[in-house]
Amino acid sequence: MKIRHDLAISVSVTSQEPFVSKNLFIPLILPIAVSIIAGGTAGYFATNERIHDLKKSNGSTREIIDPDSLRDAILAQPEIVEEAFYALQAKRQAEADAAKRGALVDSKGALFNAGQDPVIGADDAPFVLVEFFDYNCAYCKIASQWLRTALKENPGKIKVILKDFPILEGRSKGSRESSEAAWAARLQGKDKYETFHFALMDARGGFDSERIDEIAANSGLDVARLRADMKVNAKAFNALIKENMSLARSLGIDGTPAFITGNTFITGADTKKLQSLLDAAIAEDS
């Protein structure tokens, strides 16, 4: 967690003694509180200097609480510091969510117009889901179990746009190669792609070339053609991954799985939330 050092203290003055409003005090107290309690003498003088700056910036009509009074207040109610952490965390989360919503508006074309992204399900489905995934991601594998069941139980109701996002490459073996193989598999037909996609999701452990070829063969793919298509389309695949990485970055996505439907983000394998959104979309379409 980052600690801000540029926050002022809001104080209401009703008499000779300053009155600190707790609601205003909570989200703003943390930087100075930590300085005073944890910083000892150095923290005290650093805080004095900061308060002097605050006095100058706020003008002569504003009263600023002094370090001794602030320290006494915190020691009398130490839970204020904990509350400040939570308030600051909530504020940062709200800011991040707002930024995501703005980025989502700007990115809807790239997200929901599949382009070269693989698609499974019905093109005209009422529930459209975008997934950023990595074949080595354990939580992606959990989410894929829900997705496969949902597709079977709700024919014609779900469309999934799959954004290859091999973020675990370098930490888990074969994240990028398995994505490249699956992307090439779509050229052999939508059904074979879907079978291969879920077979890769079912697999445990990393992937080497031999294992990818074995899973491909068991999925009904022509492995020689698959490898040829991977070679021919390597440049296009690299461009796709670069585009997906850039899109994910603009949306604040830094892990997998990440889902988007409409204006809603779902991070992690939150299958209850996904099911709730699916049910709502189907009910609205009925």
Image: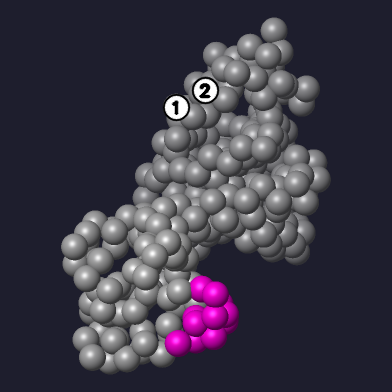
Looking at the rendered structure, the kind of residue marked 1 is Lys
Is 57 a magenta residue?
yes
- In the figure, is residue 62 to the left or right of 187? left
State the image quarter where residue 109 is shown. top right
Looking at the rendered structure, the kind of residue marked 2 is Ser
Residue shown at 57% from the left, 56% from the top: 95
Query: As rendered, which of 42 and 189 lies closer to the eye?
Result: 42
Describe the element under mark 1 as helix, strand or loop: helix
Report, in whole angstroms, how far the alpha carbon at label 2 lies from the one at label 1. 6 Å
Q: Which residue position is annotated with label 1?
A: 272
Q: Which residue position is annotated with label 2?
A: 276
* Residue 212 image offset from top left, x and y in percent: 51, 49
Start-end of magenta stretch = 52-62
| Prevailing secondary structure class for the magenta stretch in the rendered image | helix
Which quadrant does the N terminus fall into?
Answer: bottom left
Residue shown at 37% from the left, 74% from the top: 65
Residue 59's place in the image compared with 197, above or below, is below
Residue shown at 75% from the left, 40% from the top: 112
Query: As rendered, which of 182 and 256 lies closer to the eye?
Result: 256
Is 257 a magenta residue?
no
- Please say whether residue 23 is visible from this viewpoint: yes
How crowded is the residue under tag 2: few (<14 C-alpha within 10 Å), some, or many (20+)?
A: few
